Image (cartoon, rainbow, N blue to C red):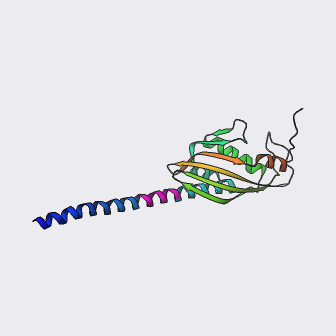
Amino acid sequence: MRKIGQIFRFLIPVIALVALVVFMTGAGRRERATVEKNKAVVMRKLEAWNTGNMAIADEVYASDIVRHADTVPEGIIRGRDALKQYIMACRTAWPDFHGTALDVVAQGDKVVVRWKITGTFTGQVEGWPAPNGKETVFECLEMYRLAGGKIVEDWYYGQDTYVWYQMGLKLVPAK
């Protein structure tokens, strides 16, 4: 009887340790799977921008998406419909708009991408400068927060002054 008691005293902590390792391994796999799914959603988002297919935008953006971008007068775009209008304005200005992911980093519910954007500035958009027919090339960084398999928030940081210069705008010092 004493020997059985000794065996159990030894086995119980071993079994607990094995169970903990199995649990932690599974949790790590689930975390990696979520991160990979989030990266796939962000890459799918690029397809909406590259093709203008707004059905994809409906699929990847939450209805209450918030986009922080200093390229819009208010500095923020609220809601999927407003964001879709912005995407279509960009695709009108640059009908051959094409984004390519250069770097992708993800952790938890966040994905950060460094993009290269190209397009020929040929389309007229109200409130924008007249198109000059020149190719525009720039890089930007975006950070996305995802929940429920959709992008719920994003932060855009681009080479805006460089883009404006390529669009034909010139910065003039204030007098």
Residue 41 image point, x, y percent: 57, 55
What's the residue at 44%, 59% (across, down)? 28
Between residue 151 and residue 162, name the one nearer to us: 162
Would you say the magenta stretch is mainly helix, strand or loop? helix
In the picture, which quadrant includes the C terminus? top right
What's the residue at 62%, 58% (across, down)? 104
Residue 115 image point, x, y percent: 69, 56
Between residue 134 and residue 95, name the one nearer to us: 134
User: Is residue 78 rendered to the left or right of residue 136?
Assistant: left
Please provide the residue range marked out in magenta. 27-35
Between residue 62 and residue 37, name the one nearer to us: 37
Number of marks in the rendered image: 0
Query: In the image, is residue 22 part of the stretch drawn in magenta?
Result: no
Task: Pick out the residue farthest to the right.
Answer: 175
User: Is residue 86 rendered to the left or right of residue 124?
Assistant: left
Task: Pick out the residue farthest to the left.
Answer: 1
Q: Quadrant of residue 105?
A: bottom right
